[in-house]
C-alpha cells in the first residue's frame, strides 16, 4: 500500500534521508541564498518588505525577521516578503517536470517558522522539514498539472507542500496535517502563469502568496480549522505510490546558470557555444533564429523595459550572451536594458514556434539556434536542453561561483563565505550553529 502523505510527514526521520537528497538540499540552500542576496537589492524586494511591515506586524504567533533585512513582522509577513524577494531575480532552483520552482517559496516560509519557534532548532530538524516541503510540493505540482487544464504558478502547489511541512514542524497530528494540506491547497494562489509570461510584472511565479498561504494553513489546522482532503495529495495516486521510497526532489531539482526564465536557457547555451566554436564577435552577427517550443516563443522581450520583462524574455538574454559573453549581475542593471549593441542583436532575433519541440518539451525544454553573419554565413546548433538539469548538472564549483557572483557584492566576502560554509552542511549543525546560520540569513547585509 502507498504510504499516506500525512503519515510520511508525521513520521519522517533524519536517518531516512538519503545522502543524494541531503546533497540536493544543501545545494539548494546555498543557491537560494545567493539569489536572495542580489534579489534583496531590487525595487520589488523593497516593495514586498514595506507591504509586509504595513500588513503583517508581529502578533501572538511571535515575530520573525525578514530575509536578509532583519525587520520584524509576523511569520506570515516574513514568508511573504522573503518569497517575493527571492522571486525578484529568476535564478533560484527549478523543476522542469513541474514547470516551476519550490525553493523560492519553501525556504522563506521555513526560515520564518524556525525564527519564530520558542525552542532551539537543529539542522537535522530543518532538513526533515525541507524534505517534506520539497517532496510534497513536487508531487502535488505534478498531480495538479496532470489534472488541471490551466497552467498555474508554483505558488499554487508549493502552498500544499509548505503547509504539510509547517504542520510537521508544529508537531500536529496526522489528521491535522491532512487538514493543513487541504487548506493550503484550497487557499493557494491558482494564478495563471502564462498571464505573467505575456504581461510580465512583479506578480512573477506566485510564491509570494504560496509561501504565506501554506504557513497560514498549518496554523489554522492547529487551531482546529478543517480543510481535508488535498485533492492533489489524495486523489492522484499515480504520483504518490512510491512516496518515501523514491525522491522526486533528487530526480527533478535543477539549477540555473543564468538569472532568467528556464525556457530561455537552452537557447542561451546554444548561442554561447556557437559564438565560441566559430570565434565570432557580436559585430559579426546580422541575425538570430531561435527555434523552440510554443510557450518559450511567448517569452518575446526583444526590448525589455524592466527587470520583470527581462526575466520573462528570450531574445534579449540570448543577445546579452552574444554581446557580453555572460548574463550576470551587470546584465540585471538598468543600463544593460539600454545597451545599443544588445538591443541591435535582440531586435534582429526571430522566434520560431516549432511543433516538434513543443511535442517533446515535456519534462525537458528544447531549442536550437541559428546565427547568421554579416558576410552571409549561417551556423546552426544541435538541438539541446538546459545546462543545470540533472542530466547536465552544474558542478559544486559552478554552484559556488554563481553564489559568490551574486552574494559577494551585497553581503561582502566574509559573510558570504560563512553562509556558504554553513548552508553546505546545514543538516549536521547543532542548535547553536543553526541559529548562527539563521542570523546570517535573516539579518541585513
Image (cartoon, rainbow, N blue to C red):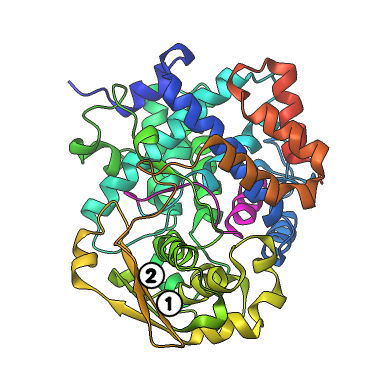
71 to the left or right of 98: right
Name the residue located 61 percent from the left edge and 21 percent from the top edge. Answer: 123
Tell me whether circle 2 and circle 1 mark residues in contact (CB < 8 Å).
yes
Measured along the vertical axis of the image, is residue 222 above or below residue 198?
above
Specify the label residue 194 is tagged with.
Answer: 2
Q: Quadrant of the N terminus?
A: top left
Crowding at dot 1, Cα within 10 Å, few <14 / some 14-19 / many 20+, comes out as: some
Measured along the vertical axis of the image, is residue 18 above or below residue 70?
above
374 to the left or right of 66: left
Locate residue 176: give its quadrant.
Answer: top left
Q: Is residue 201 visible?
A: no
Q: Position of residue 332 (x, y in %)?
A: 65, 67
Q: Position of residue 177 (x, y in %)?
A: 41, 29
Q: Position of residue 445 (x, y in %)?
A: 82, 46
Dot 1: what SS? helix
Which span is picked out in magenta? 76-98
Q: Is residue 219 visible?
A: yes
Q: CA distance from mark 2 to mark 1?
A: 6 Å
Q: Which residue is denoted by mark 1 in the rendering?
A: 198
265 to the left or right of 107: left
Amino acid at each position: 500500500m502507498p504510504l499516506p502523505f500525512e503519515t510520511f510527514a508525521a513520521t519522517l526521520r533524519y536517518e531516512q534521508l538519503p545522502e543524494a537528497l541531503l546533497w540536493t538540499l544543501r545545494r539548494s540552500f546555498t543557491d537560494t541564498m545567493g539569489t536572495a542576496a542580489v534579489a534583496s537589492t531590487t525595487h520589488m524586494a523593497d516593495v514586498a518588505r514595506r507591504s509586509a511591515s504595513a500588513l503583517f506586524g508581529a502578533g501572538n504567533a511571535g515575530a520573525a525577521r525578514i530575509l536578509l533585512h532583519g525587520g520584524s513582522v509576523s511569520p506570515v509577513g516574513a514568508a511573504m516578503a522573503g518569497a517575493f524577494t527571492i522571486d525578484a531575480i529568476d535564478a533560484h532552483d527549478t523543476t522542469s517536470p513541474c514547470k516551476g520552482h519550490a525553493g523560492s517559496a519553501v525556504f522563506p516560509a521555513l526560515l520564518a517558522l524556525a525564527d519564530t519557534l520558542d525552542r532551539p532548532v537543529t539542522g537535522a530538524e530543518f532538513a526533515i522539514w525541507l524534505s517534506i516541503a520539497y517532496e510534497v510540493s513536487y508531487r502535488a505540482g505534478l498531480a495538479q498539472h496532470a489534472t488541471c487544464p490551466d497552467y498555474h504558478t508554483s505558488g499554487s502547489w508549493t502552498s500544499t507542500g509548505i503547509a504539510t511541512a509547517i504542520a510537521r514542524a508544529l508537531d500536529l497530528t496526522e489528521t491535522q496535517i491532512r487538514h493543513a494540506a487541504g487548506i493550503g491547497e484550497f487557499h493557494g494562489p491558482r494564478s495563471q502563469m502564462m498571464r505573467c509570461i505575456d504581461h510580465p510584472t512583479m506578480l512573477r511565479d506566485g510564491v509570494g502568496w504560496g509561501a504565506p498561504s501554506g504557513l497560514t494553513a498549518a496554523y489554522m489546522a492547529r487551531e482546529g480549522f478543517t480543510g481535508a482532503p488535498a485533492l492533489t495529495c489524495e486523489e492522484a495516486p499515480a504520483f504518490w505510490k512510491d512516496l518515501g521510497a523514491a525522491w522526486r526532489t533528487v530526480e527533478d531539482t535543477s539549477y540555473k546558470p543564468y538569472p532568467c526564465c528556464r525556457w530561455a536557457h537552452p537557447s542561451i547555451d546554444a548561442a554561447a557555444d556557437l559564438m565560441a566554436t566559430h570565434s565570432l564577435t557580436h559585430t559579426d552577427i546580422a541575425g538570430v533564429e531561435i527555434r523552440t517550443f510554443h510557450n518559450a516563443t511567448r517569452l518575446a522581450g526583444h526590448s525589455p523595459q524592466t527587470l520583470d520583462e527581462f526575466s520573462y524574455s528570450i531574445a534579449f538574454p540570448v543577445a546579452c550572451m552574444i554581446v557580453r559573453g555572460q548574463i550576470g549581475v551587470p546584465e540585471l542593471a538598468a543600463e544593460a536594458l539600454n545597451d545599443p549593441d544588445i538591443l541591435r542583436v535582440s531586435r534582429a532575433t526571430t522566434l520560431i514556434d516549432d511543433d516538434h519541440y513543443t511535442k517533446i518539451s515535456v519534462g525537458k525544454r528544447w531549442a536550437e539556434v541559428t546565427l547568421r553573419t554579416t558576410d552571409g554565413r549561417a551556423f546552426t546548433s544541435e538541438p539541446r536542453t538546459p545546462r543545470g538539469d540533472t542530466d547536465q548538472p552544474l558542478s559544486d564549483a559552478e554552484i559556488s561561483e554563481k553564489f559568490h557572483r551574486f552574494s559577494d557584492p551585497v553581503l561582502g566576502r566574509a559573510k558570504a563565505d560563512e553562509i556558504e560554509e554553513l548552508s553546505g552542511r546545514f543538516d549536521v549543525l547543532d542548535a547553536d550553529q543553526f541559529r548562527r546560520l539563521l542570523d546570517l540569513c535573516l539579518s541585513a547585509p
